[in-house]
Image (tube, helix red, strand yellow):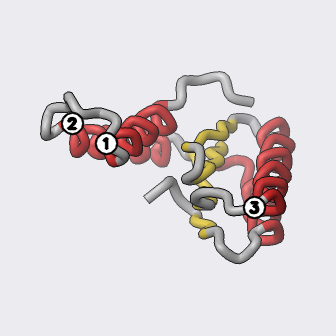
Amino acid sequence: MQDTYDPFSFLLSEISAFDAGERENWDPCQRQHYFDVLLADEAEEIAWGRRHLTVVHGRLTDDIEADLLDDLFAAWEEVAVSASWARIGGVPDQHLTLTIADDSSDLFSAAIDVSLRLNPGSWRVIEGAFP
């Protein structure tokens, strides 16, 4: 499954930490720089033929929603193991993103289906990277 570095989760976690006031010593341009890097990384992955599926779940409100998110992650792991290339990343209390090689279109469709089926109604399912 994942055999490569995941710049998205790290950079998005850093941006979230900054937004929460946990990165006080940042240069004023650092946040925008990270967004620019993320945009370039996403474009590069799309050029390589990779597709992104994101579920924005936010802070989990109860045990049922937490169980649904666990079920989603387990289902995506099954999809990723079957793909020629895949990665699962995300930021706690924010989102999960599945990135998969384009030659795995049936698997990508299966990931969309399970995401929609498990959605408790408050999640946003996006065919793309985290906005």
**SS type, badge 3:** loop
Q: Position of residue 86 (x, y in %)?
A: 68, 38
Q: Nearer the viewer, residue 45 or 130?
A: 130
Does residue 9 appear to the left or right of 55 in the view shown?
A: left
Q: Which residue is mark 2?
A: 30
Comparing labels 2 and 1, the label whose residue is closer to the camera: 1
Does 57 appear above or below 100?
Answer: below
Q: Earlier in the sequence, mark 2 or mark 3?
A: 2
The answer to whether one can see residue 78 in this image is: yes
Residue lying furthest bottom = 121
Q: Quick one: label 3, few (<14), some, or many (20+) residues within 10 Å?
A: few
Q: Judge left or right: residue 37 versus residue 111.
A: left
> How far is mark 2 from mark 3, CA to CA?
35 Å
Label 2 crowd bin: few (<14), some (14–19), many (20+), radius 10 Å: few
Amino acid under label 1?
Gly
Q: Nearer the viewer, mark 2 or mark 3?
A: 3
Quadrant of residue 66 within the rendered picture: bottom right
Q: Are the residues at dot 2 and dot 1 in contact (C-beta closer than 8 Å)? A: no
Indicate the amino acid at tag 2: Gln
Q: How much space separates mark 3 and mark 1, taking CA atoms? A: 26 Å
In the image, taking residue 104 as reference, residue 14 lies left or right, namely left
Q: Which sits earlier in the primary sequence, circle 2 or circle 1?
A: 1
Q: Which residue is mark 1?
A: 21
**Total labels drawn:** 3
- Residue marked by disc 3: 62
Q: Residue at x 75, y 61 (%)?
A: 62
